[in-house]
Amino acid sequence: MALPANLELLFGESHEAPKLSKAEVSERFDELVKSIGGMPERELTREEIVTSFKAGQPVDFTSQPTNALGYLEKALGAPDLVKGLGADAVASITQALDGLKAQTPDLVKDINLTSPVGTGLVAFDLEAPAKLLAPRPTPLRNRIPRIKGIGTSHRFKVISGFTGSGTGGVGNIHPGIQDTTQNNFAPSGAGNSLYYARGPKIAYAGYDVTLPYSQFSMSDEVTWSAQYAGQGYQDIRQLSRTSLLYASMLMEERMILMGRGTASPYSGALAAPGGVSLVDNTVGTGQVALTGYTTNIYVYVTSDAGAFGESVVSSVATIAPTSTHNVVLRLTDVPQALGYNVYIGTGASQPANSSFFLYGRFPNQTANGGGAGGTGIVLQGAIPTSGKNPPTADTSAYAAGYDGILPWVMGTQSGYNVKINSTFSTSNPGSEFQTAFAALYNAVKADPDRILFNGVDRKQQSDTLKAGSSNNYFLQITQDQVSGVSLGSVAVAIMNEVTGKRVEMEVHPWLPQGVCPILSDTLPIPDTQVSNVWSMINVQDLMGIDWPVNQFAYESSSYWFGGMLCYAPAWNGCISGVTAA
């Protein structure tokens, strides 16, 4: 029989015995094996087995050995083995086993979920590939036509009105004549007068439009280590290209909705809010005190442009609030602002910009705080001590950018742009939009096709059917619905009470709360030479580029070159300042 490892540790030198030779160690091991092998064996009878499991005589399984070392230690305690080896020899072996246990702890462990490896000898139930849960809706990009462009800008000419149209600032003239009627047909600025017996000449109004194109691109990179390490799990390059495509489309969707350009004739950067002031305020119902300051608070405000940035900061306002009070912020409204970002700093004197932190974004309906009797923005609760700092430059508009839908419908060319600074009417649901429809029709005979809503605003408009106690709407539960009622009512469209047309209500996933664009897809006028009111004009539409490998990475980019235009902004409008219910 081969000698086991660490045999000297079991039978060799100890405190009491001198060091033994290998022959003497081998003899001791042989004596141990012989004694164990010579232990008497006994076969239990059936009666003895049954008797051992009788009620009241439970078996103590916890005292049974659980591993090889335990069995060896129990065997050393057998009377016959002690008698054969001698008590001193058994004690020496037991002491050696204790030392071996300390040096080789795995001898006392079973294989389980934490042994012999802490994380277990188990497989990972990893499901491939990774789940792509990022939302990627682009409803405007999917709907708006995309047209081929050339050059560096898109140009067109507009006849905005002529006599009788009631548009373009052209007045009306009476067409009646008599035999003696004569009208001057001399060219403008001519030195002589040419009168003819004929009806008066009509007048025209028009203008040129030049919209410059911009270039756009996004990029991604996959290192070789990431690509090769991911083999067998996922194609990382494929994921990169797919994500790059979706990211480019999502950013274009946001530009279509709320982008702002600085080139002429785009709307340009938003102005910083003016008239910023702070008023000490006793805590009202539903409010809490302002906390987190010891002396003064200082406030900056910026105009929010939506997805891409904000204006420069306003002038700073400061106040030393009364303890247990809060503060009301007032400001003057900024046209086309989608909301206001408030930054707060504290101290005995004005702190550095790095110590101002974003307190919150407030929808544009709060701008009425600057006017007489306005409610303003209530600053309450804990003042932030970390987070975003005030901007150091304008990010509301970009040189490489164009105006999206919101700048068009909230700008000076819009056919209707009103800020209601309240919730939707419950006494006459949809009345705000009926007023807009009437104004658009009276101005240019517009007949809109759809209204875009933020999800919160769409819900509020649906709830107006139920909220008003004086309206004539009611919900009816029929007999077959008694045991299965579907709760909720959804407003899906508004009937234009001026033209009788059904105007669709649509939720846009990226539209800020408080703003509802009213859009025309086509014009209700024959022979306008305008197939679509909104169009994307691209010299080069979206494409993907795989760059040559010049480092240990695969690099890709998207690229497109063009812009967006609105041929007839006066046929569109906007209701803003919608307060969340």
Image (tube, rainbow, N blue to C red):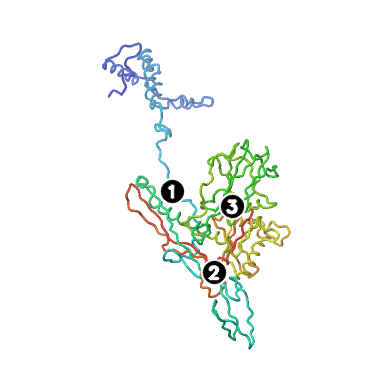
The CA distance from mark 3 to mark 2 is 30 Å
Residue 545: quadrant of the picture: bottom left
The image shows residue 122 at horizontal and vertical percentages of 40, 38
**Residue 531 located left or right of residue 373:** left
In the rendering, which numbered label is found on residue 522?
2
Residue 101: quadrant of the picture: top left
Q: Quick one: label 1 or label 3, which is nearer the N terminus? A: 1
Marks 1 & 3, CB-CB < 8 Å contact: no
Q: Residue at x 33, y 11 (%)?
A: 17
Of residues 234 and 202, the one nearer the viewer is 202
**Of labels 3 and 2, the one closer to you:** 3
Amino acid found under the numbered disc labelled 3 = Gly
Of residues 58 and 258, the one nearer the viewer is 258
Question: What quarter of the picture does the N terminus occupy?
Answer: top left
In the rendering, which numbered label is found on residue 339?
3
Q: Residue furthest right?
A: 470
Of residues 420 and 320, the one nearer the viewer is 320
Amino acid found under the numbered disc labelled 1 = Ala
Residue 343 drawn above or below residue 305: above
In the rendering, which numbered label is found on residue 542?
none
The CA distance from mark 1 to mark 3 is 37 Å
Q: Quick one: label 3 or label 2, which is nearer the N terminus? A: 3
Q: Quick one: label 1 or label 2, which is nearer the N terminus? A: 1
The image shows residue 10 at horizontal and vertical percentages of 34, 19
Marks 3 & 2, CB-CB < 8 Å contact: no
Of residues 547 and 355, the one nearer the viewer is 355
Can residue 360 be seen from the camera position used here?
no
Residue on which disc 1 sits? 130
Identify the element where label 3 is drawn: strand
Would you call the spot at circle 1 few (<14 residues within 10 Å), some (14-19), or many (20 or more)?
A: few
Q: Residue furthest front?
A: 191
